[in-house]
Structure formats: structure tokens, C-alpha cells
């Protein structure tokens, strides 16, 4: 009898370990998908900005647009691979396929469209990727700590990169042209306001959750870089009739801010693996 009890206990432990390993593997598969969608969001942001810069007179940006489109193809393949390994992912696959088809069509005809329309259309597809990621996070991650961290990443950190990206993208087009149109002023002001809001939300979260890989100096530098870029845009670009800035340098400064924010993304994401 005692051997039977011991056998039952052993089998229970083995089943528990197996269930734990299976849950961990499922989480890893879903995390890979969430992060690869992040990658295509960042690449689409850069494609949008460079396209707008080129279409407003910065000819140097054209080759960079093609480079970013190649990056898109890479991340699309990664997302396809992720979805193929996740059970019950048909609804996610349908949404991802629809966005991919739309983006591919836009890439082919972007240079033949009005720059404002191209900018708005890329923005809409980025919003769709963010919405899909939010759905994946809400349905696939039940652990409250992991879910909370992913909501921060997709609901605050990536919207911060998105608004920096919109300000960088539209702003570089304005700088390349040399003047800010009346229709662009309220849009750029809105991007600046959203950057302030999301930066505050991100920093507020990081004040309550410490990460060894992010020192106070790191956080101060990240926050200050974003603040400086926003102030430069507000004072030298938005509403200005004559702008004396370099479009490529303006774009690169925005990219630097996005890279800073992505450091936060990586540090938080690394704790979830």
C-alpha cells in the first residue's frame, strides 16, 4: 500500500512539473509573438517617417525607406512563424494577415500618393498592430504580474514611441520642406502633448517598480532626451514659417529618443522570460 501511495505522489509531482513546463513554453511562444509585433510596429513607424521626409524633399531618405521595407518582410516572417506554433491562434492570424496585406499594398503605392494620406494610412496600420497585441496580451496571459508588465509595454511604452515617431516623421517632412503648414500645427501639438502624457505614465510606473538594469541616472537621461526633443520641436518646428534645421539630424534625434524608450521596453521584457 505504501508503495502505491509513493507511486501516486511521484506521478502527481511529474504531472505538476509537466504542466508547469508546458505553461512556461506557451508563455514563451506568446511572448515571442508580442515582441515580434513590437518589432514590426517600430519598423513601420520608421518607414512612415522616412517616407514622409522623402516625399517632402529629403531625397537622401529614399534608400532608407527601402531598407525599412526589407526589415518589415523579416518581421512578417517572424510573426508567421510565431502564430504557427501557438494553438487556437486562428483569429490572431486572420487579423495579422489582413494588416500585412494592407501594409504591403501601401508600400507598393506609397510614393504615388499624397504624403499626408500615406502618413495617416501607416498610422492606422500601427494602431491595428497595437490593438492586436492588446488582444493577445489580454487573452493569453493570465498571470497578473506578467499581464501588468505587458500592458505597460503595449499600452504606454509603445504609444510613447508612436507619438515620438509621429512627431519625428511629420516633423522631418516639415523640416525638409522648410515651413510648417497650418494643418500640421495642431497635429504636431497633439503629438507633443501625448509624448508628455505617456512619458509621465512610464516614469511613474518605473518609480514604483525598480529594475537593476535601469539606474536613476538612466531614467533621468531618457526623460531629459525626450524633453529636449519635444522642446526643440515645439520651439523650432511647430507653426514656424521658416525652419533652419537639418531634416536628417532632426529625424536621427527622434530615433535616439525612441531607442532610449526601447531600452525600457527591453529591461522590463527581459524580466518576463
Image (tube, rainbow, N blue to C red):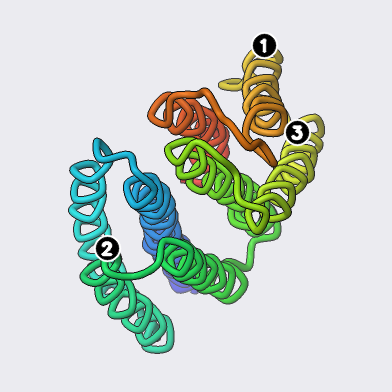
Secondary structure found at label 2: helix
Secondary structure found at label 1: helix
Tell me where residue 1 appears, x and y as whole percent.
49, 74
Q: Earlier in the sequence, mark 1 or mark 3?
A: 3
* Label placed on residue 1: none
| Residue located at (25% from left, 72% from top) | 109
- Tell me how far mark 1 sits from mark 3, CA to CA: 13 Å
| Residue located at (62% from left, 72% from top) | 138
Residue 97, located in which quarter of the rendered image?
A: bottom left
Of 124 and 159, nearer the camera is: 124
Q: Earlier in the sequence, mark 1 or mark 2?
A: 2
Residue 63, located in which quarter of the rendered image?
A: top left
Left or right: where 182 falls relative to 81:
right
Look at the numbered discs 3 and 2 and tell me whether their residues touch, using CB distance below 8 Å. Answer: no
Of 99 and 212, nearer the camera is: 99
* Label placed on residue 203: 3
Tell me the crowding category of disc 1: few under 14, some 14 to 19, or many 20 or more residues within 10 angstroms, Cα based.
few
- Where is mark 1, residue-wise? 217
Mark whose residue sits in front, 3 or 2: 2
Tell me where residue 235 appears, x and y as whole percent.
71, 28
- Where is mark 2, residue-wise? 111
Tell me where residue 26 appears, x and y as whole percent.
41, 66
Image height check: is 199 above or below 153?
above
Look at the numbered discs 1 and 3 and tell me whether their residues touch, using CB distance below 8 Å. Answer: no
Amino acid at each position: 500500500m505504501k508503495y502505491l501511495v509513493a507511486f501516486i505522489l511521484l506521478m502527481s509531482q511529474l504531472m505538476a512539473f509537466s504542466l508547469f513546463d508546458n505553461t512556461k513554453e506557451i508563455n514563451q511562444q506568446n511572448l515571442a509573438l508580442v515582441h515580434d509585433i513590437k518589432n514590426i510596429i517600430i519598423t513601420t513607424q520608421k518607414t512612415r517617417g522616412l517616407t514622409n521626409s522623402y516625399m517632402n524633399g529629403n531625397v537622401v531618405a529614399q534608400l532608407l525607406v527601402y531598407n525599412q521595407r526589407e526589415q518589415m518582410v523579416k518581421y512578417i516572417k517572424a510573426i508567421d512563424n510565431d502564430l504557427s506554433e501557438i494553438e487556437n491562434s486562428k483569429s490572431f492570424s486572420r487579423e495579422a494577415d489582413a494588416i500585412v496585406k494592407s501594409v504591403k499594398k501601401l508600400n507598393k503605392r506609397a510614393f504615388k500618393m499624397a504624403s499626408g494620406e500615406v502618413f495617416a494610412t501607416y498610422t492606422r496600420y500601427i494602431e491595428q498592430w497595437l490593438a492586436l497585441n492588446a488582444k493577445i496580451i489580454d487573452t493569453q496571459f493570465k498571470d497578473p504580474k506578467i499581464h501588468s508588465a505587458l500592458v505597460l509595454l503595449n499600452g504606454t511604452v509603445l504609444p510613447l514611441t508612436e507619438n515620438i515617431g509621429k512627431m519625428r516623421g511629420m516633423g522631418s517632412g516639415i523640416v525638409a520642406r522648410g515651413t510648417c503648414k497650418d494643418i500640421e500645427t495642431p497635429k504636431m501639438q497633439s503629438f507633443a502633448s501625448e509624448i508628455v502624457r505617456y512619458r509621465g505614465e512610464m516614469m511613474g510606473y518605473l518609480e514604483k517598480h525598480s529594475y537593476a538594469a535601469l539606474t536613476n541616472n538612466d531614467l533621468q537621461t531618457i526623460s531629459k532626451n525626450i524633453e529636449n526633443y519635444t522642446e526643440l520641436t515645439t520651439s523650432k518646428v511647430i507653426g514656424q514659417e521658416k525652419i533652419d534645421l537639418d531634416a536628417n539630424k532632426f529625424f536621427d534625434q527622434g530615433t535616439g529618443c525612441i531607442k532610449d524608450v526601447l531600452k525600457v521596453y527591453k529591461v522590463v521584457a527581459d524580466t518576463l522570460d
